[in-house]
Image (tube, rainbow, N blue to C red):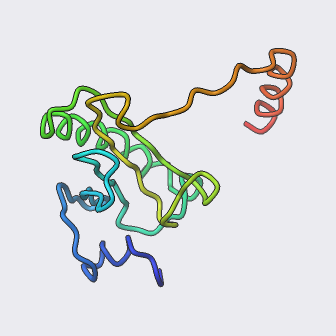
């Protein structure tokens, strides 16, 4: 894939600090970490978002992310973690190559996340119905 920084990392054209490699994935240190120990899990093949990823590959990603999160927590002395997957520019995806962030956390203040506003309970069932129709 042309002009994809993660494809260049997979291909060895851009250096990275890798913590894990297997036939499907590379896990590496994020060079713009949200917290110490922030890792990225990227597939060796180029997929833009979760919607493009084959289900067998997705099925391998979460167990591997769990192992990486356990190692990161122990490695940096954290007590919690976030797993974040941004899909599309509007979600904050900066690199159009599927990747999963593992963000070790020592404090909820390290990465402030805003809690959503209460839902309008008169509209929520209709939103649920629209989603169910598309399953």
109 horizontally vs 106: left or right: right
Q: On screen, 84 above or below 130?
A: below
Depth order, front residue of 133/34:
34
Number of disc labels: 0
Q: On screen, 96 above or below 15?
A: above
Q: On screen, 121 above or below 48?
A: above
Outermost residue, top direction? 121
**Residue 13 on image: x %, y %:** 27, 83
* Residue plotted at (41% across, 68% down): 45
Give the image quarter of residue 119. top right
Q: On screen, 15 above or below 61?
A: below
**Residue 71 on image: x %, y %:** 17, 39
Outermost residue, front direction? 109
31 horizontally vs 97: left or right: left
Depth order, front residue of 43/32:
32
Depth order, front residue of 3/33:
33
120 horizontally vs 62: left or right: right
**Residue 50 on image: x %, y %:** 54, 52
Give the image quarter of residue 124. top right
* Residue plotted at (19% across, 55% down): 20
* Residue plotted at (18% across, 64% down): 17
**Residue 5 on image: x %, y %:** 39, 75
* Residue plotted at (37% across, 40% down): 62
Quadrant housing the C terminus: top right
């Amino acid at each position: 894939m042309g002009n994809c920084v993660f494809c260049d990392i997979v291909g060895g054209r851009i250096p990275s600090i890798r913590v894990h490699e297997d036939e499907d994935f590379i896990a590496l240190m994020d060079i713009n970490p949200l917290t110490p120990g922030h890792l990225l899990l990227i597939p060796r093949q180029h997929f833009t978002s979760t919607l493009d990823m084959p289900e067998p590959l997705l099925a391998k990603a979460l167990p591997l992310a769990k192992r990486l999160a356990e190692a990161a927590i122990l490695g940096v002395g954290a007590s919690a973690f976030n797993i974040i997957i941004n899909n599309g520019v509007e979600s904050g995806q900066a690199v159009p190559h599927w990747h999963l962030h593992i963000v070790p956390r020592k404090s909820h203040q390290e990465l402030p996340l805003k809690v959503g506003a209460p839902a309008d309970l008169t509209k929520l069932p209709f939103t649920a119905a629209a989603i169910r129709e598309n399953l």
